[in-house]
Image: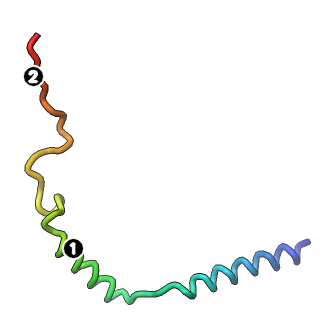
Amino acid sequence: MSSSSNLITMRKIVQQLRFEAKINRVKVSQAAADLQQFCLENAQQDPLVTGMSSNPFKPPRVCSFL
């Protein structure tokens, strides 16, 4: 039973390694350049960069007369 279990485990490992070997890799320098370009293109819509004019989480004021 032990050798059978070991064989199944090894097959799963080989299958996982084959799957990972097929993944397309991108160089870190290219990924960094792409990320920088994306950030620069979307900086105007980012409230963390530009700030917000008002607090969107502030509860709306309700004016009611009793």
Ranked by sequence position, the earlier of labels 1 and 2 is: 1
Residue under the image location 63 percent in, 83 percent down: 17
Vertical position of residue 66 compared to residue 45: above or below: above
**Is the C-beta separation of discs 1 and 2 under 8 Å?**
no
Instruction: Give 33 or 42, whichever is nearer the viewer.
Output: 42
Residue under the image location 19 percent in, 70 percent down: 42
Vertical position of residue 62 compared to residue 33: above or below: above
- The numbered mark at residue 39 is 1
Give SS at disc 2: loop
The residue singled out by tag 2 in the image is 63
Give SS at disc 1: helix
Q: In which quarter of the image is the N terminus?
A: bottom right
Amino acid beneath label 2:
Cys
| Image-quadrant location for residue 15 | bottom right
Residue under the image location 18 percent in, 60 percent down: 48
In the image as oriented, which residue stretches furthest toward the top? 66
- The numbered mark at residue 4 is none
Q: In which quarter of the image is the C terminus?
A: top left
- Is 37 left, or right, of 7 in this rendering? left
Q: Where is residue 57 in the image (x, y as percent from the top left)?
A: 21, 41
